[in-house]
Image: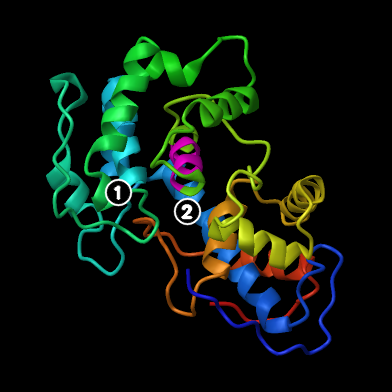
């Protein structure tokens, strides 16, 4: 993980982001949060590439399997077709097969480790089979709230080779595509302390305590009228070098009005965005 330098301290202060002391850092966070919200809205209204295939699959098992492969391998950045490598590796869930991942090209947020081959994918299939299928495992009890369903699925999917970031995004995608009634209530920031989103959150919020991290993340999301899950990708991209945004295959552009509203919440009214 590369260490990204902070912008120069220019006296910026705001209660929502007490770890930030540079206007440029706060402005970039506004940019990334506006983009992350746009990406979630795109998933719900007009999903790109293989996300659209999952949304219209008409079969919960095939849809969940495709979303798992997308999150596990990651859409490519800078490619004409961000989903091409995933499409090439994909095999139908109904086939019972595990895809061959030798030499597969992966995106910047991929979980796949070539040294493990297809072990994690095989473990996912085995996990789902033990639960009576992916749909049964992911949906859980019909009485659960969307937040409870997300949390339980996140816990159940804790397997070697499927770290916090791709696992969290997998469930976020399932919810926003309308495939499962699930929504997170938290960012699950304490699961893996070296996860780049976790590291970024500690920098932005100026604290490492789990309870305070959660409370400050929720406060920021509410103040910016953003879903809590938008902060996952926003914080990750904020921590990356300039020009290396992870789009996850999204074609979305941030709404200027929303970006301005977020900037205003951060005390940056009038600051220009990207």
In the figure, residue 105 lies in which quadrant?
bottom left
Left or right, 77 with respect to 41, comes to left
Which range of residues does the magenta coloring cover?
166-173
Mark 1 vs mark 2: give the one in front: 1
Task: Provide residue 66's location: percent of width, then percent of height.
Answer: 28, 35
- Residue 267 lies in the magenta stretch: no
- Report the front residue among 149 and 50: 149
Rendered residue at 44%/49% (across/down): 42
Q: Is residue 259 above or below residue 109?
A: below
In the figure, residue 141 lies in which quadrant?
top right
Q: Main secondary structure of the magenta part?
A: helix
Rendered residue at 51%/55% (across/down): 38
According to the picture, the residue beneath numbered tag 1 turns out to be 73
Task: Provide residue 94's location: percent of width, then percent of height.
Answer: 18, 19
- Report the front residue among 5 and 46: 5
Between marks 1 and 2, how big is the CA–CA gap?
Answer: 18 Å
Rendered residue at 36%/12% (across/down): 130
* Crowdedness near tag 2: few (<14), some (14–19) or many (≥20) residues, C-alpha within 10 Å: many
Secondary structure of the residue carrying tag 2 is: helix
| Tag 1 near tag 2, CB within 8 Å | no
According to the picture, the residue beneath numbered tag 2 turns out to be 39
Q: Mark 1 or 2 closer to N-term? A: 2
Secondary structure of the residue carrying tag 1 is: helix
| Residue projecting furthest to the front | 115
Left or right, 243 with respect to 255, comes to left
Task: Provide residue 169's location: percent of width, then percent of height.
Answer: 47, 44
Q: Is residue 89 above or below residue 26?
A: above
- Report the front residue among 101 and 86: 101
Rendered residue at 21%/47% (across/down): 86
């Amino acid at each position: 993980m590369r260490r990204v330098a902070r912008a120069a301290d220019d006296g910026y202060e705001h209660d929502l982001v007490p770890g930030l002391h540079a206007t440029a850092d706060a402005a970039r966070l506004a940019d990334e949060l506006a983009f992350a919200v746009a990406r979630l809205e795109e998933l719900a209204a007009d999903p790109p590439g293989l996300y659209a295939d999952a949304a219209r699959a008409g079969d919960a098992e095939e849809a969940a399997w495709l979303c798992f492969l997308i999150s596990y391998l990651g859409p490519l950045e800078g490619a004409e077709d961000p989903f091409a490598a995933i499409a090439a590796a994909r095999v139908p869930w109904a086939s019972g097969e595990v895809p061959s991942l030798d030499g597969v090209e992966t995106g910047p947020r991929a979980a796949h480790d070539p040294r493990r081959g297809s072990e994690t994918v095989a473990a996912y299939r085995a996990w789902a089979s033990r639960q009576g299928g992916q749909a049964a495992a992911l949906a859980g009890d019909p009485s659960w709230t969307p937040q409870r369903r997300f949390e339980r699925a996140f816990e159940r999917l804790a397997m070697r080779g499927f770290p916090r970031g791709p696992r969290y995004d997998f469930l976020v995608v399932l919810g926003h595509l309308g495939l499962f009634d699930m929504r997170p209530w938290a960012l699950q920031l304490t699961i893996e302390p070296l996860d780049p989103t976790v590291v970024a959150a500690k920098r932005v919020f100026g604290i490492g305590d789990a309870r305070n991290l959660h409370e400050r993340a929720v406060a920021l999301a509410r103040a910016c009228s953003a879903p809590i899950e938008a902060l996952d990708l926003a914080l990750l991209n904020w921590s990356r070098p300039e020009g290396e945004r992870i789009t996850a295959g999204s074609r979305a552009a941030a709404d200027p009005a929303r970006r301005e509203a977020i900037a205003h919440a951060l005390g940056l009214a009038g600051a220009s965005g990207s």
